[in-house]
Image (tube, grey):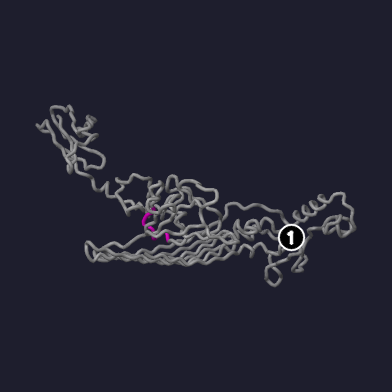
Amino acid sequence: VSGRVTDQKSGDGLPGVTVLLKGTTNGVSTNSDGAFSLSVPATGGTLVFSSVNYIPQERAIGTQSEFAIGLATDTKQLSEVVVTGYGGSQDVKDITGSIATVKAEKLLLQPVVSVDQALTGRVAGLNINATSGTLGDVTAIRIRGANSLSNSSQPLVVLDGVPLNTTDQGNVLGSRYNPLADINPNDIASVEVLKDASASAIYGSRAANGVLVITTKRGKAGTNRVSVNSYYGLQQAVRTPKVLNAADFIAISNEKAANARAGSVGAPGNIGNTSIPVNAAGQATVAAPIDVNGDGVPDETDWIKEIFRTGRQQNYQAALSGGNEFAQYYGSADWNDQQGIIIQNRLRRGSARLSVDLTPKKWLKAGTTLSYAKTYNQGVNGEGALAGATVSGYTAPPNVPEFNPDGTYYLNNLGNLGNGNNAVPSTYAPNAYYHIVGT
């Protein structure tokens, strides 16, 4: 048998179409003009014609020896649409640039506070690294690697067509604002990662580091839909460093001071010309047992245990959507409360989103989206501060108490606590943000 396979719509010959005798491995592929020739048994059978992006077709052989087959395009395979950022959206088959898409179902596989956390490990070539352990802090997102030693290499983030400012906005305490932490991951329909230079066609130099196009959910015609979900979780540090106890700290501190001034001659009360105290025997006493509350027991504090804790996270979300052929709506609200594993660190976010789409005529369409988020980030001192939260725990002397007898924090700037800061309250660095986006 022989014949020719063409595109049903254009009539052009289709090369590479598989022509197979059903139930066997006997088959051939069409040539560049769509023609084929195949030897079949005298008993006949059924020919199966198949090709990528076309609907397979079967034809009984019977007494026929010449076939003219027209294959129809498989619209189901070609209906996937990608938001490109340059020219709206396009069929996936027409895309020539480097674009990766992450759908909502993959973003919600794990409970996360920020969309950048949900993207971690989901896209090839997209590197996302936390810059600190502070909740809601800026993450380092790299699509094309680090392009500058002094300027930011962060990609442009576009939320429903509105570019967001992702510049590191920090303060002297090292706390920075991450706008992606204001977006409820449950509201996201998809995220497109535009990797190549074609993204700069619409966004210009701002897209030099790539683009993250975030599209939020919108209402659909049909029955009203209500979704409610919540979760609660715990976090713990797997391992914390071990530090000196009070007795070892006192012994090592005094030995270090004595060795540093070995051979110096001075009267009891000092070594050489320094202010390092000594006892009557000439032994250094830069550190000594302290009993602030007067109970006869020397004070001792493990600052690492006082700074670290079991973190808790709770999240509550609700969404309502629906509409008809003329109007569709989507509304949502969420509340997230996350306590970090560092004491004082806490991130609270409340957000609401409303989108309305109107189609009064087939040729007329209008819509609006409004989102509001309030984030209160009770952060901790980061690497931009004089001393980070964990550094305070490492350096604070263990022979002093955390609290005074009256319950207030113990502070002493005479040497026991250096600059007079207690390690626990000095971790505190609060920030509050309001974020409104409308289109």
Near-viewer residue (273 or 146) = 146
Residue 113 seen in render: no
Q: Is residue 339 magenta?
A: no
Residue 325 image offset from top left, x and y in percent: 24, 64
Residue 153 image offset from top left, x and y in percent: 49, 50
Identify the residue at image location x=29%, y=61%: 220
Residue 170 seen in render: yes
Identify the residue at image location x=78%, y=54%: 251
Residue under label 1, please give it.
399
Residue 390 image offset from top left, x and y in percent: 63, 56
Residue 39 image offset from top left, x and y in percent: 17, 27
Indicate the quadrant containing the C terminus: top left, top right, bottom left or bottom right.
bottom left
Above-or-below relation of 186 to 145: below
Which secondary structure, mark 1? loop
Left/right placement of residue 347 relative to residue 256 reads: left
- For the record, the magenta segment spans 184-191
Near-viewer residue (332 or 225) = 332
Left/right placement of residue 44 relative to residue 325 reads: left
Q: Is residue 185 magenta?
A: yes
